[in-house]
Image (tube, rainbow, N blue to C red):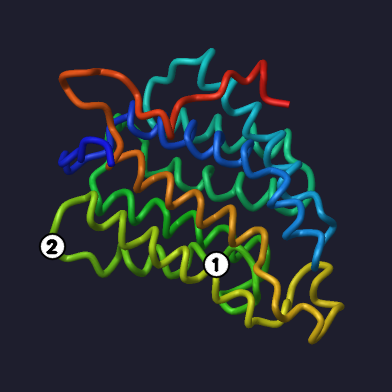
Amino acid sequence: MGHVNMAEVLRESDLRTWIENFANVVLRERDHLDELDSAIGDGEHGSNLAQGMTAVLTLLRDSEFTDLREMFDAIGMTIVNSVGGASGALYGTLFLRFSDAGDGRRELDLGILTAALASGMAGMMELGRTKAGDKTMLDAIHPAVEALSSARDGSLAMALERAAQAATQGRDATAAMLARRGRGSYLGDRSLGHVDAGATSMAALFQTLSDTVRQSPTPSSGQPDSSTAVVDPERAT
């Protein structure tokens, strides 16, 4: 495990690294996400999301932002404009709604971060007309936001670790759920036994957020942890 960042705020640099790390995971797990999606969907969740996150890597490499609102607005719009299918609209909405909390800010504490993620989740629910238990990405983000909302003590790193664990548990729970949205909803009982691809990528979003805090570089080395090294978008294919 890398150096534990005990700071009680997430700086702009931390949030950039989070999104870069998430993009790297999506690119690495693209085929696995497609395979999961092929069981009850169109089989393109990984490919579509990888296309969008490659565009986001380019955005972050080439851009500077006045505040976190501008950064997450740009991330959200990049995803909306480059990701096909429902996942583009849902992830785009998540980050666009998240961005409101960054107005005039260059760092977020736990309370503001939680409110931002809750707002993003609400936007996803409104857009998708879905709720927890429908076998979607909401089944990962909902327990994660609940875990953050209930955090009363301990470090930011501890709260994010608990949120990541809750998201992973929510992801795994989708295997026992009937799909109630999208193509999977036409399968009935045949959708049982399959983990939802959207919940899987959403759990990765929270895991990379936790890892970004816990695997920050040590003051002495200044070198990024190898597990979270940024992929060059020009080589992401």
Q: Position of residue 195 (x, y in %)?
A: 65, 69
Q: Amino acid at mark 1?
A: Arg
- 128 relative to 218, above or below: below
Q: Residue at x 26, y 69 (%)?
A: 150
In the drawing, what numbered circle is on residue 153?
2
Residue 50 lies in what quarter of the image? top right
In the rendered picture of this protein, how many numbered marks are placed on residues?
2
Q: Residue at x 35, y 24 (%)?
A: 224
Q: Secondary structure at mark 2?
A: loop
Mark nearer the N terminus (1 vs 2) = 2
Q: Calculate the distance from the C-alpha at mark 1 to the C-alpha at mark 2.
A: 26 Å
Residue identifier under label 1: 171
Q: Position of residue 80 (x, y in %)?
A: 68, 39
The residue nearer to you, when weighing 75 against 104, is 75
The residue nearer to you, when weighing 85 against 43, is 43
Q: Position of residue 99 (x, y in %)?
A: 45, 40
Horizontal side of residue 48 vs 98, given as left or right: right
